[in-house]
Image (cartoon, rainbow, N blue to C red):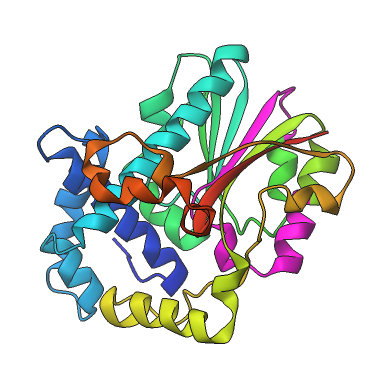
Amino acid sequence: MNIKIGDIAATSFVTLYCHAIESQSRDPILNDPKAVEITHELNKILCDSNNKLERDLAKGKIDKQLVVHVTIRAKQYDKYVGKFLESSPEGVVVNIGCGLDSRFLRVDNGKVIFYDLDLPEVIEIKRQFFKENERYHVIASSVLDYNWMSIVAKHKGPFLFIAEGVFMYLHKEDVKSLVLKLQSEFPGSELVCEVVNSLWLKKPLKRMVNYKMQHRGHIGKDATFHFGIRDSKEMEGWNAGIQFLDDWSYFDSEEKKLGWLKMFRNSELFRKTQWTVHYKLN
């Protein structure tokens, strides 16, 4: 198995291991047996890696707070999909930047059409563990290569696009172009995406974020944040048809493992450091 992937794609390994570690904990936030299965296989390779991040993952050495945050986020995105399928049980869900996540297995209602989209290097690994069928498909492509949309557009919809931990690694002009393209190609669709506060993109603060990711998390230097917004309704200004529906922050969670961090839910500064926005693309 070839697991030579870029810095940004490597963050999908971190997400995967967070899911696996939490799934094996007491009273888990997220139950993801597929993540446990995949990590058991990857451990055989990563334990001898020259990359410190990969060796740490194989040893289960991940910050406990990160594990909690990542799994709380995954559970919330599962809820977004579940709510969409309540009103549109035969709808189409596109998981942008899917990594090695097994969301389809967690949300499958027996009717949904589900697409996992990620870079070819990630999908090559994903194909080792997931089999496509008439309702589950994978697409090996950059989200910015819009040819993938013609594959999804073969369906009638309605459509839900989710981007968990993706947009912050893209540049603003690319995110704006992508959102406007989704709006024009899939009118009436919904978009759920994670964003960071643009304050963290300014030099002093961005330097702190990069240091934490590269020196404490051992994430490669190419995995750095480029895109952010200041307010949940900011994307409405890109086009009159973009409608803000709701937002969600980690600090909104009632999960007991979040602990004392719940106190920040009443502070907009902390609540909107890294959070999720939900739009209708009319």
Image quadrant of residue 220?
Answer: bottom left
Residue name at image x 46 percent, y 58 percent: 270
Residue name at image x 40 percent, y 70 percent: 5
Residue name at image x 19 percent, y 56 percent: 64
Instruction: Give the x, y percent position of residue 10.
Output: 38, 66
Q: Is residue 257 left or right of residue 89?
A: left
**Magenta stretch encompasses residue 154:** yes
Q: Is residue 24 left or right of residue 141?
A: left
Residue name at image x 62 percent, y 64 percent: 228
Above or below — where is 103 with respect to 92?
below
Instruction: Give the x, y percent position of residue 236.
Output: 80, 47
Above or below — where is 70 with respect to 92?
below
Instruction: Give the x, y percent position of residue 238.
Output: 84, 53
Q: Is residue 92 left or right of residue 157?
A: left
- In this rendering, does residue 89 appear at all? no
Instruction: Give the x, y percent position of residue 159.
Output: 68, 29
Quadrant containing the C terminus is: top right
Which residues lie in the magenta part?
153-179
Quadrant containing the N terminus is: bottom left
Q: Nearer the viewer, residue 252 or 277?
A: 252
Q: Nearer the viewer, residue 138 or 82?
A: 82
**Magenta stretch encompasses residue 240:** no
